[in-house]
Image: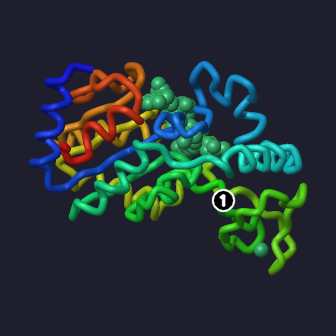
Amino acid sequence: MSDPDLQMLRSRLQQSQDLVVLTGAGISAESGVPTFRGQDGLWRQYRAVDLATPEAFQRDPGLVWEFYRWRRRLLAPLRPNPAHLALANLEERRHRFTLITQNIDGLHTLAGSRRIIELHGNIWHLRCTGCGQVREDRRLDLPPLPTCDACGALWRPHVVWFGEMLDPAVLAAAYAAVEASDLMLIIGTSGLVQPAASLGRLAKQRGAFVAEINLEPTPQTDFYDLALQGKAGDLVPQLLLPAR
Ligand code: BJW
Ligand code: ZN
């Protein structure tokens, strides 16, 4: 990371009228949340296709629920880090601001972010496979196969699995925010999973300035205007918090 790049992005932020931020697993890494594809990534230990697809849930809902119960227990004690907190603080100072996250961990909300679009759902929400109702449930002692008290069908985690459509209303809101933005920050995502991976390019096509913050370059980096390499927990507060 070179200081001039950080300074340049800070002045872009000051000029910007309409800011969109897209986050991925990397922003939660310093809180202790495992990323998906890194060296210690979740998908290195578990085959995603066995656990995070509708087919897996149909085949063996007990196994899929075991995986999600384990992850809920892992996430429960974790707290937002300085990057989450800096984004929540920024939201209070910006008129037009949207935070789009691929993360299901709920840490942005815990940090105080309110204008947030959760593209891939939320692990603390359950959806009934029968009647479709969605409910927040933070219990760590869910039964092996939790069932809906209204209709008796199985609950599932309210998250988006591979091969599933994102909620059309959620996706439309994300597209609308991106299309209206003049500056987009993309933080801690590998840029591999669609359709989130294309949002930065869409912003660029619509004339926005697009900057990436990541430990390393991604397949999308070359399409963006600027890339800052380093930890989100260091760079995001440096970039967003008012100079002291
Ligand atoms: C740091 C850091 C630090 C670390 N500081 N940085 C077009 C072509 C080919 C395939 C497809 C396509 N369109 C759709 C598909 C299929 C599929 C897809 O994209 N597959 C690709 C893998 C090729 N997409 C879908 O299925 C989506 N649905 C869809 O498109 O519907 C229509 C359709 C259906 C079928 C066929 C075609 C179209 C749904 C995607 C749902 C993703 N779900 C998951 C799981 C959620 C639930 C759960 O967690 O259990 O969402 S997968 C997983 O990946 C999770 C994440 O949100 C998502 C993105 O991961 P993310 O956040 O980028 O994490 P990592 O680990 O990959 O990267 C971390 C980054 O952080 C790294 O770059 C590090 O360097 C960095 N980092 N520490 C800064 N401290
Ligand atoms: Zn039900």
Judge from the rendering whether residue 99 lies leftward or rightward of residue 58; answer left or right. Answer: left
| Residue 7: x %, y % from top left | 14, 32
User: Residue at point 44% right, 56% down?
Assistant: 171
Judge from the rendering whether residue 162 lies leftward or rightward of residue 130; answer left or right. Answer: left
| Residue 20: x %, y % from top left | 29, 50
| Residue 116: x %, y % from top left | 42, 59
| 34 relative to 126, above or below | above
Crowdedness of circle 1 by 10 Å Cα count: few (<14), some, many (20+)?
many
Tell me if the residue at label 1 has its CB under 8 Å from ligand 1: no
Location of mark 1 (residue): 124
For mark 1, give the secondary structure. Answer: strand
Judge from the rendering whether residue 95 lies leftward or rightward of residue 65; answer left or right. Answer: left
| The N terminus: image quadrant | top left
| The C terminus: image quadrant | top left
- Can you tell which quarter of the image residue 228 is in? top left
Question: Looking at the image, which is closer to me, 217 or 228?
Answer: 228
Instruction: Please state which amino acid type lies under the numbered disc 1.
Output: Trp
